[in-house]
Amino acid sequence: MSFLDQLNPQQREAVETTEGPVLILAGAGSGKTRVITYRIAYLIEHMGVMPESILAMTFTNKAAAEMGERVEKLVGGLSIAKPLISTFHSFCVRVLRRDIEALQIPSATPGQPPIGHTKKFVIYDESDQQSVVKGIMKRLGVDDKQLTPRTVLSRISWAKNHMLDPRELYLQSADPKNEKIAHLFEQYRKELRKANALDFDDLLLEATRLLKSAAHVREYYNRRFQYLLIDEYQDTNRPQYELMRMLAGEQHNVCAVGDEDQSIYSWRGADIRNILEFEKDFPEAKIIRLEQNYRSTQNILQAASSVVANNLRRKGKNLWTARQGGTKIGYYEAPDGENEALFAADHVAKYLREAAERGETPRAAVLYRTNSQSRLFEEAMRRYGLKYKVVGGFSFYERSEIKDMISYLKVIQNPDDSISLLRVINTPTRGIGKSTIDTIERLALETGLSLWGALGEAIRRQLLPQRALAAVKNFQQLIVEAQAILSGTFAEKLENSVDPGEPLAPAEAETEPAAEDDAAAFDPNELDNTAFDFGGAYTGDAADSSLGVPPAVVQEEDRASRPLPGRRDAGATTASTADLLKFLIDRTGYIKLLEAEETPESFSRIENLRELVNAAMDSRDRGETLDQFLDHAALISDADDYDERSQITLMSLHAAKGLEFPLVFLSGLEEGLFPHSRTMLQPDDVEEERRLCYVGMTRAMDQLILTRAVYRRRYGTDLPEASVPSRFLEEVPIQLVEELGKRRSTSNVSTGHLGTAALGSLPRAQSRGPAGLSPAAYDAGDTHYSYEDEDQSATWKRSGVPASRQKPTVPAKPYNSIENIAEFFASRGKKFTVGKIPVEEPTGKRGFRPGQKVRHPKYGEGTVYQREGEGEQAKITVQFPRFGLKKLVEKYAQLERA
DNA sequence: CCCTGGTCCCAACTT
DNA sequence: GGGACCAGGG
């Protein structure tokens, strides 16, 4: 076993202790992933364990994919079968897609279908959940100012994560408000059941319930999975914990890996007790500590350890590193958020240059507490012409045009999904207005039918005015046809239909011959994989180990249970998701309408839709069904779009978990931002913030830089507010720190801690350099990110406005030039097709500034009050003596100097 | 019915 | 900075 030689004794023990429960307390950077992957390889190669009987749970799809690749490298070629490496949520989806119907209970009325979710369930994301709650509150007349849907939802999620049902939540309620929430929770559950939908929390909850209540299902998984590994164990919640217990079976071959100092998801129900009390759950457990850090320098490790040492709820550990010394922790105190970002951009630019000279592959990360902070850093990077990637924020699948199409697909898969139905019933507009929808909703309420059911009923009973009736029929037809296309019964449906409606656009059939798809989607080779089938209908996992998408097995079962199984039957044609999308886009005229708009936004939306079709084609090539495509879309997460090839990454601290970078910026170290204001009242929450800080600091390999803005704007337009340095700064030993961006002499403080030195002992003016100081007096190389170059500081002084309220102009490319827009899209992983966008002319000619006198053709003379935006979008507010304040678009306003 | 523009209120982390 | 909602005109 040559690869074992690469491990230290503790790591090796962790790998070789294969039988019985093991808890690996893996400090930051201690080679956790290496241990897990080697352990899997060891089980397969050395212990002769069948790969498919190993199950590893991770937190993100990305982590699962990476782990899969690393295992593959270690044992590659040994076997076609693979261990299943998946996120908890993806795993639960596949369990449910297979067996959720075992949870159904027979209907009280004979002859009625059983009650409960079917295999065709859809997954509701947060906005779907929000719509459900809003709808219920509206129906019940709950004032949504006293009780916001947000509050209700977070309480519902809290209850679910603690495995409380509405009744239990009600019994726990101490006041009418919480009783109301419990009631809404009950309605919410009913609504989801009616829609055959599950939310994220339900995925874990229902899978757990299924394993608990259906012995045959549980036994199946226990037989199948003999070895269980759980990553990030400190962040598991109650349902995940119970799932683990159930999957552990009687053999208890559980290997949990985690670090209590990195528990950062308690707000999602993660229970730190799971890791602190593992030994109680499994008295025979072996505990192994990995305390050598291979990632960071001693300075970084010591700084991070000093911070987290202030927490009381921890086991405590002695993390050490062989990398003595190292660069000091940098600290930069910026006058404002913009400057903070420019400092980072400048520093990164320099770092990239130097690393390139040394022949290294540079990688830097800017970490922040809240995603909204990314904007400033993005702008700064763009001004410096740096390529960067943002992880998180709004994802592809959250864009409205994508959500529209996904909603169509969800309705086609499961027409009872009323939330999706409402989204698309009049998108694009087809004459189904508010009153029509009201009528259908009322009918649904009266009859207990879903909206889709009520819609059919309304048509049958002619309950709508002629015009609306026709529109609704049209919509129904669209969905029915799409369903027929999907199931391959399209031709049949057409024949049986009394009114076939418009014929299917011929382009469809021509561009994508159905027969070809058929062949691609149902490659006979794929069936051969069942040779590796283990213990029943479950097939190999080759297809999904990387993305955690449910495996071919679901498809297998679908085919078997479908009334028209003959995928090679003459005449029957099965369509792929991509075909379906093309059909929808064509029939709804969605792209045509966007084309007609001819705006940059509409073009970019078209691009997005093309991208979606591409994604669907990839999905088809993997042999996935519509279910699987939708599951993937629902479960893909923000952290998944981290690309390690990117040299500069901007992301939240949470998203950075598990990653490492030579250079790390930890920004916004201000009380109220980090630690966040919503956490500052509860000691436990502050401890979690501190752990988050620890996670952030320990991402750094060679250099860590902490930054803070003295003034920060909380909302776009508000005045900036003065900030107080984060308490975490004070917890970093000052001797490990070097202050950046000021004269060395002022940072020469030998005792005390950083926060006190930075704030307490230095007068404000001095920390930004004495007035009138020439740049030469600053440390060479640390000057050009500062705005305090002579020419600019002159402008500031003249206007007398605090520096933090001015938008400085930075020498760089014009901000909204075509290249920069394209670059911006590229950095977000989007293609941007340049349509007809006028190239920006330099704004110098017009560029009116506050205080200037101007003349307007209609309003006469006035004084410029303020200016917002740049270039094309620049708006200026002008005070006209007779007309008051007017906000004008500079480009159109025909202003002249007066 | 649909679109527009104005106003109000919000803004933590994420599977 | 922006999403949700509403009023009012086409």
Image: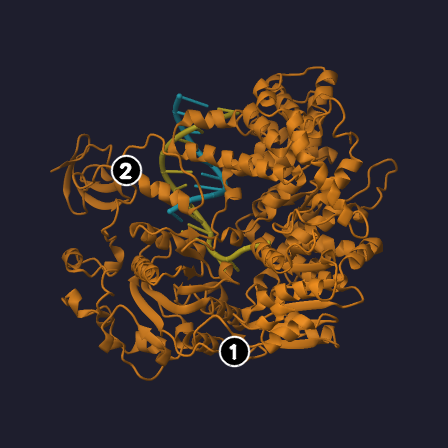
Chain colours: A orange, B yellow, C cyan
Q: Is residue A453 left or right of residue A755?
A: right
Residue highlighted by disc 2: A872
Local crowd at mark 2 within 10 Å, few (<14), some, or many (≥20)? some
Q: Kindly indicate the quadrant of the structure image that contains residue A500.
A: top right
Can residue A312 be seen by looking at this rendering?
yes
| Residue at image point 15% right, 60% down | A790
| Residue at image point 49% right, 53% down | A642
**Residues under numbered marks 1 and 2 in contact, where contact means CB atoms less than 8 Å apart:** no
> Between A16 and A468, which is closer to the camera in this rendering?
A16
Residue lying at the far front of the rendered structure? A2
Residue lying at the far right of the rendered structure? A110
Q: CA distance from mark 1 to mark 2?
A: 54 Å
Residue A774 point in image, percent of width and height: 14, 66
Residue lying at the far bottom of the rendered structure? A751
Q: Is residue A283 left or right of residue A355?
A: right
Residue type, numbered disc 1: Leu
* Residue at mark 2: chain: A
The reply to whether label 1 and label 2 mark residues of one chain is: yes
How many numbered marks are there?
Answer: 2
Residue A813 point in image, percent of width and height: 26, 46
Residue highlighted by disc 1: A319
* Residue at mark 1: chain: A
> Between A273 and A431, which is closer to the camera in this rendering?
A273
| Residue at image point 23% right, 40% down | A884
Local crowd at mark 1 within 10 Å, few (<14), some, or many (≥20)? some
